[in-house]
Amino acid sequence: MSKSPARSSGARQGFSLQFRLLYLLVVANRHRDLKIDRVLQPLALNPPRFRALMAIGLLGSCTMSELADASAVDRTTMTRTVDQLVAAELVERTTPPQDRRQVVLRLTHAGFSLARTAKEAVEALNARLLDGIDEAAQRAAHTVLERLLANAMEDGDLPHRLLLAPGIEARPDASEALRY
């Protein structure tokens, strides 16, 4: 059902293109998260645990600070999420002998397996969400969103280090199973 032009244009009055664009991104992502939650329920995952698994898998191993930065989640919230993943034996915490104060996170074998299964489920959902949007438009959107993320982050190079750009190689210790 299409909206009347008067209602559609009236709803936009007073809001800049930039405001509307970023608002649409937030709302679209929230709706995607709701769908991801339903898709991941059979796997006993939710969007925050899924994102943490993906980030740890892509990074290969990481500290809690690196994970929090990569996920744009505060450390306290991320610690609760990681505690759940550790309790489920999907993530392990290790302490490097050279720095006993540091804690390194790494996926377990079960974590890699579940991450791979969850990634496939989310990729199928993503394909449905992007239905009707050709590859050229998806690449253009990727370029725009990558730049937006770089502008939003204090470390503008972090998106590249997190493997968000096509063709960027994973860290040497990252899992082959989760590479793009």
Image: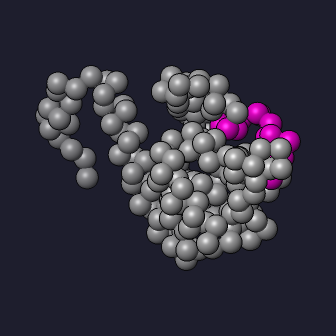
**Image coords of residue 171 (percent x, y):** 80, 40
Q: Quadrant of residue 59?
A: top right
Residue displayed at 38% across by 42% down: 26
Q: Is residue 136 visible?
A: no
Query: In the depicted view, which residue is nearer to us: 82 or 157?
Result: 82
50 relative to 44, above or below: above
Asked if the stretch drawn in magenta spans residue 173, the answer is yes
- Determine whether, in the image, residue 18 is placed left or right of residue 3: right
Majority secondary structure of the magenta segment? Answer: loop
Give the mark count: 0
Does the magenta segment cover residue 38? no
Q: Residue at x 46, y 69 (%)?
A: 38
Please tell me in which quadrant of the rendered image residue 168 appears.
Answer: top right
Q: Nearer the viewer, residue 79 or 110?
A: 79
The colour scheme of the drawn protein is one colour
Q: Which residues are magenta?
A: 162-175
